[in-house]
């Protein structure tokens, strides 16, 4: 794993967990993939709970206001092919839900940037091709999470 860089791609897991992360452990210039924005856009539709749907919609709107998503283009498609092949070589599954992770990682690879994720284990088979950085969590305070405007239980269905 690599040290904090001045620039980087944020995985969906980081965008979901921003309120719980130490901002000093994130890149000063952060970007997201269009794939991350797609995952966030699906989030509100993936729950029947009205309060959770509202939290996810708020997260999506804040992300849209904060980040200009990097598009998925032909260069990223080629990088995805390299990562797919690397996952196969490592004996890991490159299809299904994992395809989103690989496309986000391909965005980092194609742009020559490290990938920041709270799920570094999802990318261990790709570290020969991309740098993975796990941001630090903020030390929990005695103040309840709801008082800080954050959810107490990030939904695993929305993380990649």
Image (cartoon, helix red, strand yellow):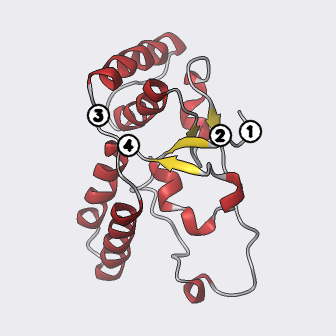
Image coordinates of residue 135 in percent, x first then y, are 67, 50
Q: Quadrant of residue 57?
A: bottom left
> In the image, is residue 99 above or below residue 125?
below
What's the residue at 26%, 57% (across, down)? 42
Image coordinates of residue 111 in percent, x first then y, are 46, 29
Q: Which residue is mark 2?
A: 133
Determine the CA span between mark 1 and mark 3.
26 Å
Looking at the image, residue 51 sits to the left or right of residue 92; the answer is left
Q: Secondary structure at mark 1?
A: loop
Residue 33: mark in rendering: 4
Q: Which residue is mark 1?
A: 3
Q: Quadrant of residue 66?
A: bottom left
Q: Secondary structure at mark 2?
A: strand
Question: Which of the two labelled residues, at mark 1 and mark 2, occupies the earlier sequence position?
Answer: 1
Determine the CA span between mark 1 and mark 4.
21 Å
CB under 8 Å between discs 1 and 2:
yes
């Amino acid at each position: 794993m690599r040290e904090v860089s001045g620039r980087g791609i944020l995985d969906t897991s980081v965008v979901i967990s921003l309120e719980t992360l130490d901002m000093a452990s994130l890149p000063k210039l952060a970007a997201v993939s269009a794939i991350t924005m797609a995952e966030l856009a699906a989030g509100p539709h993936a729950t029947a709970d009205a309060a959770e749907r509202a939290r996810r919609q708020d997260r999506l709107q804040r992300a849209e206001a904060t980040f200009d998503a990097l598009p998925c283009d032909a260069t990223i498609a080629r990088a995805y092919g390299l990562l797919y092949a690397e996952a196969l070589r490592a004996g890991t599954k490159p299809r299904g839900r994992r395809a989103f992770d690989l496309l986000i990682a391909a965005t980092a690879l194609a742009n020559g940037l490290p990938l920041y994720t709270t799920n570094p284990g999802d990318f261990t088979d790709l570290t020969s091709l991309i740098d993975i950085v796990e941001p630090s969590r903020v030390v929990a305070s005695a103040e309840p999470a709801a008082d800080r405007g954050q959810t107490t239980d990030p939904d695993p269905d929305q993380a990649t």
